[in-house]
Amino acid sequence: TEEAAPQLTKSEVEALTSKRDQDRRASRQAAAAIESCSKRTAALDAELTKATGELAVLIHQRAEQANNLGSMKGGRFGAPSTRRAATNLQASIEKLDAQTERLSEHIETMQKEKDGLSQRETEALSTFTRSTSFATVLDTRLRIDAEARSRGTQSPELKKATQRQG
């Protein structure tokens, strides 16, 4: 009996219930953030896969056109049609270079966003785990205390357990 703590007062139960409710809200918000991050990450993965494929195609096209231009320059370069074709190829290569640069920047931006989402998801998971654990422990302790009151006995000390969790 000396080791058992006294039952909680009504104000202690109210304070702990309020803390539990706050933690439940934090847990729900964290769960929503986790879901949102997961959905956006999946969408980014799909976009990254598509963009990476497009970048590979652009790089391949640029290499082919550079080879074609090199072949033209190796032959007779004096005819007007050859010069025009070489000029067109050079313009096409420059256009491909610009597209490649834009796409590379877009891929980098998506990767940075994905890294940020990963960090947010980790933080939300930590909040979710901490809040859910405390609310579960507190619910169990409040139930034990209520059962002890109904039996007219004393419950284990709740203050120390909840202070450690809080």
Image (cartoon, grey):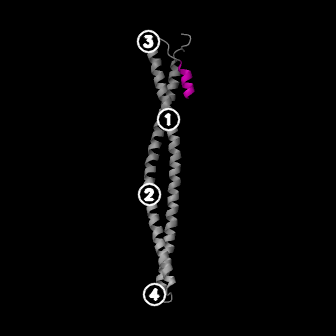
Q: Amino acid at mark 4?
A: Ser
Distance Cα–Cα, label 2 vs label 3: 63 Å
Residue to which mark 1 is pinned: 129
Q: Residues within 10 Å of mark 4 (few under 14, many from 20)?
A: few
Image location (x, y in percent) of residue 114: 50, 51
Q: Amino acid at mark 2?
A: Thr
Image location (x, y in percent) of residue 32: 45, 41
- Assess whether residue 104 is covered by the magenta stretch: no
Magenta segment's dominant SS is helix
Establish if 4 lies above or below 126.
above
Task: Between label 1 and label 4, give the one nearer the viewer.
Answer: 4
Q: Residue at point 45% right, 87% down?
A: 81
Image location (x, y in percent) of residue 146: 45, 18
Q: Residues within 10 Å of mark 2 (few under 14, many from 20)?
A: few
Residue to which mark 2 is pinned: 49
Distance Cα–Cα, label 1 vs label 4: 71 Å
Q: Are marks 3 and 4 in contact (CB under 8 Å)?
A: no
Of the image marks 3 and 4, the number of the one nearer the N terminus: 4
Q: Amino acid at mark 1?
A: Thr
Label of residue 151 in the image: 3
